[in-house]
């Protein structure tokens, strides 16, 4: 298994590379350092779990890697592009074409039907016949019968399946998931993570996932631990690498 | 309960956006409705007073039978707390200076005038001044023309019958003399106590005794009820409303205010309704939470009822704090132009509509969704949808709408108004239904993409329910505002047309037939050509279809025109501002028939073909009614109840000619030359009255404009309330779109386009519905004619599209300024 994650050919840069990532937010009278000197590389097709205590900075890291925010210091490269050098619109373009998201709280638009929610990123990316592709994906996640239902008419697990369909709709090269099973019970969570992993395998997507769920983390090729804003990757022996 | 108390604090509420909108809507609602109602009631009182001054009293009792009324009648009036005054009017010859002259005498008691003021001059070159009582015993005031005719000077004596009186002033204008063309001879005013000594007034001579009454409206009505059974046919009781035509313009202003007030009620209700309903819906989560914490349905009901009540009171107090100074400002503006200012007073009854509007719209819209929540079992509350299905809400909405239109009805007291507005609204809703259907069928096919237009249309389709209800409220708001703007415009145009700056301000009366050309030539030479000249014959209408007219007409109808001599004329073409409502105008060469003024025809119950007999001097003339026509009484041109064809019934009877013309103030001296050259022609100066009317109209116009501004402000609040109702949803959507890779510019353009389409449609619907309402109103209330108003049909949808797209842009502000990460955190 480790073979897959070992050195990649020089011609293909890593999918994600973070260098000396530091993130601070300014509070009323002092500044809070959320991330401190984070370095990581994630290769194409890899699946990576980020685990850590609540408040340790997981979501913040994910957001920076995905280009939803820019770091205070350091840089992020996503698929060869240095995010901090891009304009807001270029970052949006990057997200539209190459990035997918799954959130803990689903983040579906309440006014839209399941189908319309899945069509949304396709429309933004200007991909032809969004409806057909959206239908296929919803069928793939087992919601072929619920196309016209709005999020309120769906259970939590169903909503998250819609969100997963939406995330894969535009065939992203990298998918970010922030505690995708956090709001779900065990069995539903299991089903949702099965689906996530399966789609990930099918499409060869790079997966970066924040989770508390040890089983889910274990299904990823690599795991990062984050503690008080600092990242460690346990080696095969389970010891931190300096 | 301490928790309950915490939940009830207005300060805590204030932090919630929805609550702020509700309170703002309430304050504006109360302020608008209260200001308008207070001002309308003030205007009403002003109107009555200024119209009263044209009677010199609130009511007049005229005895045309040459006998005074019994003393007991006056004592009864005293006992009822009414002020009274007396006048005696008769014609006689007076002697003085170089000759004698037929004059029309008005002898007045000390109390005259009870309302209004007399304008006098101490000498031909002295300034004009206003006084509130007539000449004292032994004195006489005379018309300036008489001074010239008799070549008198101030201080000279004038013989009236056996009595010698001292000329102590020149009478320029008497409050009740404005338009009476019957006063053909120059006026002389003296004290009533001097009348017996003149020996002129004897049993059987043609004398009119006039009694003046003033006081509280209720006392006047009570007195009239007491008096009515004792009145004889020769007695005429005259009130302001059926007095001369002066106050027509102001009555229309009053109606306008009534309309404005009704629209304000509606707008206010909409604003409060939208905001409070929005609030109620947003409270569903809280209510659910409270129920799981153990508060029962009744407790929740009480909690919210009390909270709504608290806001109601806060809003009302705030609204009144705005309304009172505003009213005071408007009222003092109005009172500035009146010669005797009306007391500004608050009519508590005028506040009722404002309070009712606030409370009804608050409770009718906010309470039902909360009340419905009480009945939901706690378990389901947790799983229930924060939204509400339309079906649940419909009956409530219906009840609330009925309640609000009931309010308008109560307020305006005009069914026609309510029906017109409702009709416009129904039309609007029907159009909206159609639009909704069209939107679903057409927009469903549109597919999104990177293109802003397509994304905007997709957005419209996806939010069709929200979009339609927003269009509905915008359209309704625009309809109400546009209705008011349109009615205002036509009202002002009407006034402008009616009283242009060069409206005739002098009448020439009593022009002998053989001097007509010379008179016309004189004014032609002065560069002030005369309006149309009409012959005038004075006569009474005595028989209707062969029956004496006083028997033929029911007793209840006391018609001034029957007691007085009427001005009869003949003319070959219909005056421009007259309009035939029934029958046919005389054809060329017609010599039979008579054309009757519509209002009089209505009161007498005249039909085409009825036979009218007139007594003119010793002659009797009988003609059939061939047409009924309306006249513009306030046109400042000669108007006639009865018109005959040339060579018709009046052929051969002695006639004098009458006309009116405009004379600019700087040419006033020409009048002296004129009087010297044509001493028998009477000049009636009404320039003073006209400029008063113009001033009042100007002030009222300004007040109307202020009120319009107030109402437009209310409309803006409604819009803001509606837009902010979907604010959170739209911001959430914007944030997510950005996360999913939507470019900022795309987001901005598609949102602005979506709102522009929304605004354009709303504007179009609103304007069309406004046209419909104006069409109905114009017909029933303002007597105007209707035409399409392109000047609003085109710009309003445009403006509304622009304003709304800016609103949309403004909403996006927080979504654009921060990173998507932070947005998502906020929305969690
Ligand atoms: N914009 C911000 N302003 C202030 N504090 C912030 C901001 N963003 C993050 N933080 C703080 O930084 C810390 C890390 O936040 P983050 O959301 O990354 O934690 P997390 O590891 O995802 O926690 P959880 O497992 O609970 O989701 C938290 O203490 C959080 O309060
Ligand atoms: Mg987190």
Image (cartoon, rainbow, N blue to C red):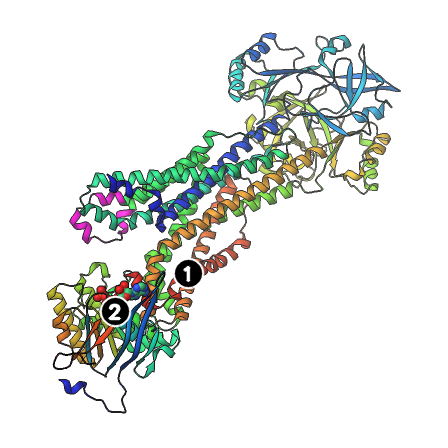
Spatial CA distance of label 2 from label 1 is 35 Å
Residues in magenta?
A: B370-393
* Residue sitting at x 32%, y 56%: B465
Of residues B97 and A124, the one nearer the viewer is A124
Magenta segment, principal secondary structure? helix
What chain does badge 2 belong to?
Answer: A
- For the view shown, which residue lies furthest in the left direction? A187
Q: Does the magenta run of residues contain B503?
A: no
Residue B462: image location, x then y, percent: 32, 62
* Residue of label 2: A57
Mark 2 Cα within 10 Å, few/some/many (few <14, many 20+)? many
Vertical placement of residue B212 versus B42, above or below: above
Q: Which image quadrant for residue B357?
A: top left
* Residue sitting at x 30%, y 47%: B280
Residue B658: image location, x then y, percent: 74, 32
Q: Describe the element under mark 2 as helix, strand or loop.
A: loop
* Residue sitting at x 81%, y 24%: B146
Of residues B166 and B627, the one nearer the viewer is B166
Image quadrant of ligand 1 equals bottom left
What chain does badge 1 belong to?
Answer: B
Residue B735: image location, x then y, percent: 33, 65
Q: Which image quadrant for residue A87?
A: bottom left
Q: Does the magenta run of residues contain B378?
A: yes
Disc assigned to residue B808: 1
Vertical placement of residue B32 versus B563, above or below: below
- For the view shown, which residue lies furthest in the bottom direction? A10
Q: Describe the element under mark 1 as helix, strand or loop.
A: helix
Vertical placement of residue B210 versus B734, above or below: above
Vertical placement of residue B485 versus A36, above or below: above
Query: Do the residues under discs 2 and 1 have CB atoms within 8 angstroms?
Result: no
């Amino acid at each position: 298994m480790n073979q897959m994650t070992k050195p990649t050919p020089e011609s293909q840069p890593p999918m994600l590379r973070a260098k000396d990532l530091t993130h601070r937010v300014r509070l009323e009278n002092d500044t809070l350092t959320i991330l401190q000197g984070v370095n990581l590389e994630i290769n194409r097709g890899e699946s990576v779990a980020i685990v850590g205590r609540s408040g340790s900075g997981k979501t913040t890291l994910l957001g920076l890697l995905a280009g939803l925010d820019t770091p205070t210091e350091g840089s992020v490269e996503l698929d060869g592009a240095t995010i901090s050098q891009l304009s807001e619109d270029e970052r949006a373009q990057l997200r539209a074409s190459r990035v997918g998201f799954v959130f803990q709280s689903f983040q579906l638009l309440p006014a839209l039907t399941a189908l319309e929610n899945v069509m949304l990123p396709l429309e933004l990316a200007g991909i032809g016949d969004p409806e057909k592709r959206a239908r296929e994906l919803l069928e793939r996640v087992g919601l072929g019968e619920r196309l016209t239902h709005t999020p309120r008419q769906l259970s939590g697990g169903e909503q998250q399946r819609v969100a997963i369909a939406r995330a894969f709709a535009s065939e992203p090269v990298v998918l970010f998931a922030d505690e995708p099973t956090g709001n779900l019970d065990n069995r539903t969570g299991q089903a949702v993570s099965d689906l996530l992993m399966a789609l990930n395998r099918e499409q060869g997507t790079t997966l970066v996932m924040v989770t508390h769920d040890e089983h889910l983390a274990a299904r990823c090729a690599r795991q990062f631990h984050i503690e008080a804003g600092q990242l460690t990757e346990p080696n095969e022996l389970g010891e931190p690498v300096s | 309960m301490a928790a309950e108390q915490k939940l009830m604090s207005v300060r805590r509420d204030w932090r919630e956006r929805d609550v702020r909108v509700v309170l703002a809507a309430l304050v504006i609602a109360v302020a608008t409705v209260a200001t308008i109602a207070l001002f309308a009631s003030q205007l009403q009182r002003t109107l009555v007073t200024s119209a009263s001054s044209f009677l010199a009293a609130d009511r007049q009792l005229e005895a045309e039978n040459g006998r005074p009324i019994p003393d007991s009648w006056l004592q009864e009036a005293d006992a009822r707390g009414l002020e009274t005054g007396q006048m005696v009017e008769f014609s006689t010859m007076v002697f003085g200076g170089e000759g004698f002259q037929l004059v029309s005498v008005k002898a007045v008691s000390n109390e005259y005038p009870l309302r209004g003021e007399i304008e006098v001059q101490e000498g031909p070159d002295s300034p004009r001044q206003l006084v509130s009582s007539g000449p004292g015993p032994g004195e006489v005031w005379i018309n300036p023309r008489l001074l010239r005719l008799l070549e008198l000077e101030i201080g000279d004596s004038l013989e009236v019958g056996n009595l010698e009186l001292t000329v102590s002033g020149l009478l320029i204008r008497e409050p009740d003399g404005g338009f009476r063309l019957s006063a053909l001879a120059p006026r002389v005013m003296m004290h009533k106590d001097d009348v017996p000594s003149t020996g002129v007034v004897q049993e059987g001579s043609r004398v009119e005794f006039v009694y003046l009454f003033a006081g509280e409206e209720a006392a006047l009505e009570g007195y009239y009820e007491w008096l009515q059974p004792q009145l004889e046919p020769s007695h005429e009781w005259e009130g302001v409303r059926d007095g001369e035509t002066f106050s027509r313009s102001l009555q229309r202003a009053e109606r306008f205010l009534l309309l404005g007030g009704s629209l304000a009620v509606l707008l206010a209700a909409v604003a409060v309704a939208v905001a409070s309903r929005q609030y109620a819906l947003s409270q569903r989560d809280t209510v659910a939470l409270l129920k799981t914490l153990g508060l029962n349905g009744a407790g929740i009901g009480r909690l919210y009822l009390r909270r709504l009540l608290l806001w109601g009171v806060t809003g009302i107090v705030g609204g009144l704090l705005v309304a009172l100074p505003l009213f005071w400002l408007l009222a003092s503006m109005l009172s500035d132009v009146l010669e005797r200012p009306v007391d500004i007073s608050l009519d508590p009854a005028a506040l009722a509509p404002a309070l009712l509007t606030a409370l009804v719209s608050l409770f009718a819209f906010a309470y039902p969704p909360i009340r419905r929540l009480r009945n939901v079992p706690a378990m389901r509350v947790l799983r229930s949808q924060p939204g509400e299905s339309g079906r649940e809400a419909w009956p409530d909405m219906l009840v609330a709408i009925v309640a609000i239109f009931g309010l308008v009805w109560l307020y305006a007291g005009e069914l026609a108004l309510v029906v017109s507005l409702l009709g416009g609204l129904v039309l609007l809703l029907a159009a909206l239904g159609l639009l909704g259907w069209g939107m679903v069928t057409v927009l469903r096919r549109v597919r999104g993409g990177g293109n802003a237009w397509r994304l905007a249309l997709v957005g419209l389709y996806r939010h069709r329910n929200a979009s339609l209800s927003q269009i509905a409220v915008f359209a309704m708001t625009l309809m109400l505002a546009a209705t008011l703007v349109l009615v205002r415009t036509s009202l002002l145009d009407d006034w402008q047309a009616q009283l242009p700056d060069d409206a005739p301000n002098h009448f020439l009366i009593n022009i002998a037939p053989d001097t007509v050309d010379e008179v016309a030539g004189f004014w032609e030479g002065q560069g002030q050509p005369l309006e149309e000249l009409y012959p005038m014959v004075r006569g009474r209408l005595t028989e209707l279809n062969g029956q004496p007219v006083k028997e033929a007409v029911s007793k209840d109808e006391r018609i001034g025109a029957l007691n007085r001599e009427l001005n009869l004329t003949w003319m070959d073409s219909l005056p421009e501002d007259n309009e035939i409502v029934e029958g046919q105008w005389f054809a060329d060469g017609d010599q039979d028939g008579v054309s009757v003024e519509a209002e009089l025809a209505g009161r007498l119950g005249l039909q085409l073909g009825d036979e009218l007999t007139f007594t003119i001097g010793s002659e009797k003339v009988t003609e059939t009614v061939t047409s009924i026509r309306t006249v513009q009484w306030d046109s400042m041109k000669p108007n006639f109840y009865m018109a005959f064809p040339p060579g018709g019934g009046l052929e051969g009877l002695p006639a004098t000619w009458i006309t009116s013309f405009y004379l600019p103030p700087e040419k006033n001296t020409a009048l002296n030359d004129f009087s010297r050259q044509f001493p028998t022609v009477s000049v009636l100066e009404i320039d003073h009255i006209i400029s008063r009317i113009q001033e009042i109209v100007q002030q009222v116009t300004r007040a109307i404009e202020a009120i319009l501004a107030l109402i437009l402000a209310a409309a803006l609040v409604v819009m803001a309330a509606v837009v902010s109702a979907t604010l959170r949803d739209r911001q959430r959507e914007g944030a997510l779109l950005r996360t999913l890779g939507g470019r900022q510019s795309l987001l901005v353009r598609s949102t602005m386009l979506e709102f522009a389409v929304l605004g354009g449609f709303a504007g179009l619907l609103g304007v069309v519905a406004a046209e419909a309402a104006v069409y109905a109103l114009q017909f029933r209330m303002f007597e105007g004619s209707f035409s399409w108003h392109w000047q609003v049909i085109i710009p309003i949808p445009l403006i509304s599209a622009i304003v709304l797209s800016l609103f949309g842009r403004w909403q996006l502000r927080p979504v654009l300024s921060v990173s998507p990460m932070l947005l998502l955190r906020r929305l969690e």
